[in-house]
Image (cartoon, grey):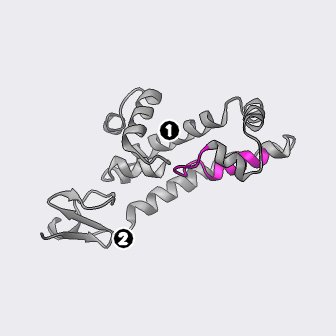
Amino acid sequence: MEKELYFTEFCVYKGEVASNFLFKPTGYGPMSHGSAAPPPHHYDVIIQQEIDAYQGAFISPDPSWPVDVRVFLVHLNEHLFDAGLTIGALERRCGLRGHDISTRFAAYMKMLPGTYRLKHRMELAKRLLKHERLKPVLIYQVVLAVGYERHDVFSRVFKRQVGCSPSQYRAY
């Protein structure tokens, strides 16, 4: 059983990803006919730069808003793309009670916290899927980057929100 090593974190066995590593081997590694391999984590760096740029564009909460709403919005923005972090867990982290803060958040943001998170996750996913330098990245890398743990769940939500599958969106 020979493995072809592309990066220290990326192994392929008979064309299959041999763990939960995320990059396609296309054009890199020993089969690339002499082309230089990108530095390790090349796509991770691009994805993180896109996440940082996206989050950097968030507006600050209005100082006239109640402190609990401002604190919750700041924490929500910081953790929008954290997989497995529920809105309820975030409320507890902020020391706030569930229904009350969600209602107050909606009064100022005009949407519930879950809707806000979903909107931003889908917007970032669309941005990453269309990014020219991320074309070789598997869609699963985008799934993880925007805070989903399962590709099938992400695909279902993406199709419901955007109107097409992630691969169709990327292709057009």
Range covered by the magenta-colored residues: 70-86
Question: Residue visible at 52% across and 42% down?
Answer: 121
Q: Amino acid at mark 1?
A: Met
Q: Does residue 83 appear left or right of residue 133 in this picture?
A: right
Q: Does residue 12 appear left or right of residue 67 in this picture?
A: left
Residue 26 shows in this picture: no
Q: Which mark is residue 46?
A: none
Residue 138 position, x and y percent, is: 32, 50
Question: Residue visible at 25% across and 66% down?
Answer: 11
Residue 160 position, x and y percent, is: 44, 27
Reading the image, the residue beneath label 1 is: 122
Mark 1 residue crowding within 10 angstroms, few (<14) / some (14–19) / many (20+):
some
Q: Residue furthest bottom?
A: 8
Reading the image, the residue beneath label 2 is: 40
Mark 2 residue crowding within 10 angstroms, few (<14) / some (14–19) / many (20+):
few
Q: Residue furthest left?
A: 1
Q: Does residue 86 appear left or right of residue 133 in this picture?
A: right
Helix, strand or loop for disc 2: loop
- Given contact means CB atoms under 8 Å apart, are the residues at marks 1 and 2 in contact? no
Residue 150 figure quarter: top left
Residue 46 position, x and y percent, is: 44, 59
Residue 83 position, x and y percent, is: 51, 50
Does 101 lie within the magenta span? no
Q: Quadrant of the C terminus?
A: top left
Q: Amino acid at mark 2?
A: Pro
Question: Residue visible at 76% across and 42% down?
Answer: 97
Helix, strand or loop for disc 1: helix
Q: Is residue 166 above or below residue 16?
A: above
Residue 12 figure quarter: bottom left
CA distance separating discs 1 and 2: 27 Å
Does 74 lie within the magenta span? yes
